[in-house]
Image (cartoon, helix red, strand yellow):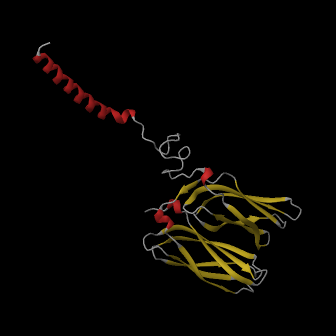
Amino acid sequence: MSWSVRRQLFILLIVFAVAGGILFLLLRPYFTVVPICTDGKKNGDETGIDCGGSCRLVCMNESKEVIVKWARTFQVSQGLYSAVAYIENQNIDSAVYQVPYEFRIYDENRQFIASRTGTTYIGPNNASAIFEGQIKAEGRIPRYTTFTFTDTPRFVKADPRALGTKILARDPVIIDRETKPKLSGTISNASSLFGVDAIDVIALVYGTDGNVIAVSKTYVESLAQNGTANVYFTWPSPFTAEPGRIEIIPRWNVLSMRF
């Protein structure tokens, strides 16, 4: 083989190598699967299928259960009651967007009276309350109340900006406690950067013995950054015991915040 032929073959090999390299780079994305958090596989840095690692969804074996501290029913008027469950989420940076639940109410003989179902969100790293009102007892007196999540709460890592947003309650005052009690207070958005929408505000009135004697709920449509809102709660009948400590709990879905 002459030198000129070898030279031509060498040049052709270089051309084919360059062309092959370019073709490989063009076709590589079609043959290389990039791990994502919705592909139904455990890949990338995931610690479970589509959870853990850089995925927002927290693997179930890596999250702590929500603790239901207590659930009780409170009379509002004749035959009408409100139910409250006091819960605690110990997961520091993760929340639940939506989970279904059920209250079940029984009389002193453990006979079923009524149930109430709903869905709720759960904020990160806090104690909170879930409220259901206007429950009819059909002429019977509730004595026992149960609260359960009817599906397993799935935790999602919250945006750090949401974790830094705090709503504080202060200045609770009760008047007319011997007739038709009224509770007023304020909530303030401690964040200087972000507003908060759709805030449920639940009031728990404790007796001097530390037990809750009355509950109520109101709603604040929005609270601007550094904003403050007055909140009011009323009851149609006097409290059953002398009120002591008051707890006002603002609740909002950190996973639905817009930034």
72 relative position to 36: left or right: right
In this view, which residue lies farthest toward the top? Answer: 1
Residue 79, picture quadrant = bottom right
Residue 95, image x, y percentages: 57, 59
Residue 175 on image: x %, y %: 67, 87
Which quadrant of the figure contains the C terminus?
bottom left
In the image, farthest residue toward the right: 109
Splitting the image into 4 quarters, where does residue 124 fall? bottom right
Residue 32 x %, y %: 39, 35
Residue drawn at x 54%, y 73% is 167
Where 249 falls versus 174 (above or below)? above
Quick one: quadrant of the N terminus?
top left
Horizontal relation, residue 51 to residue 26: left or right: right
All told, the count of numbered labels is 0
Splitting the image into 4 quarters, where does residue 68 fall? bottom right
Residue appearing at x 69%, y 52% in the figure: 150
